Image (spheres, helix red, strand yellow):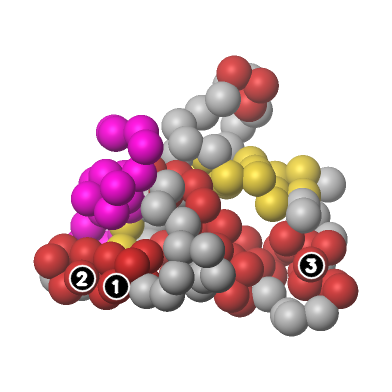
Amino acid sequence: MEMVIDASNCILGRLASSVSKELIKGKTIKVINAEKAVISGNPKHVENILSEKVRRGDPYHGPFYPRGPDQIIKRVVRGMLPKNTKGRNALKKLKVYISIPDSLKDKKPVRIGAAENKLKCKYVELGKLAGKLGAKVRW
């Protein structure tokens, strides 16, 4: 069974927990509009935390942390999956896309109600944050 999930205006952690639960159930999931997901908190503080993770370690030996919004979402979901064969197989069923690819234009995306952005505090979009981290593509 395949699900197409729209990540626009969704909180990253809540989106990732819902996606990981569906992956464990055995569904194939495709997430679109990865650059429009949001992270709550002061944008400067969030940028500092993620830039420290990207710069940490040795460029040859790691740890390697992604810079693109699609890879950041995949990394967050990976952290919520079990660390065994079942988790590795579930992660293989996840595809994350920036914007909407041509192959998925005719499919109706699902919105996750629990992940909707109803924040009254500061937040930053993942695409803007990825651009500041040094992602190759700008949004």
Name the foreground residue: 73 vs 59. 59
Does 138 appear in magenta? yes
Looking at the image, which residue is at 22% across and 65% down? 47
User: Would residue 130 appear left or right of 16 to someone viewing this image?
Assistant: left
Does 129 appear in magenta? yes
Where does the image place residue 112, in percent across and percent down from the top left?
Answer: 51, 56
CA gap between label 1 and label 3 equals 27 Å
**Residue at the disc numbered 3:** 88
Single out the mark in the foreground, 1 or 3: 1
CA gap between label 1 and label 2 equals 6 Å
Amino acid carrying mark 3 in the image:
Arg
How many residues crowd around disc 2 within 10 Å: few (fewer than 14), some, or many (20 or more)? few
Q: Judging from the image, what secondary structure is the residue with disc 2 in?
A: helix
How many residues crowd around disc 3 within 10 Å: few (fewer than 14), some, or many (20 or more)? few
Q: Judging from the image, what secondary structure is the residue with disc 1 in?
A: helix
Looking at the image, which residue is at 83% across and 63% down? 89
**Residue at the disc numbered 1:** 52
Q: Are marks 1 and 2 in contact (CB under 8 Å)?
A: yes
Single out the mark in the foreground, 1 or 2: 1
Q: Are marks 1 and 3 in contact (CB under 8 Å)?
A: no
Where does the image place residue 104, in percent across and percent down from the top left?
Answer: 63, 26
Total of numbered circles in the picture?
3
User: Would residue 117 appear left or right of 23 to someone viewing this image?
Assistant: left
**Residue at the disc numbered 2:** 48
Q: Which residues are magenta?
A: 116-139
Amino acid carrying mark 2 in the image:
Asn
Name of the residue lying farthest toward the bottom: 83
Q: Judging from the image, what secondary structure is the residue with disc 3 in?
A: helix
Return the disc, 1 or 3, that comes first in the chain's sequence.
Answer: 1
Q: Mark yes or no: residue 116 visible.
A: no
Looking at the image, which residue is at 22% across and 50% down? 132
Where does the image place residue 35, in percent across and percent down from the top left?
Answer: 38, 43
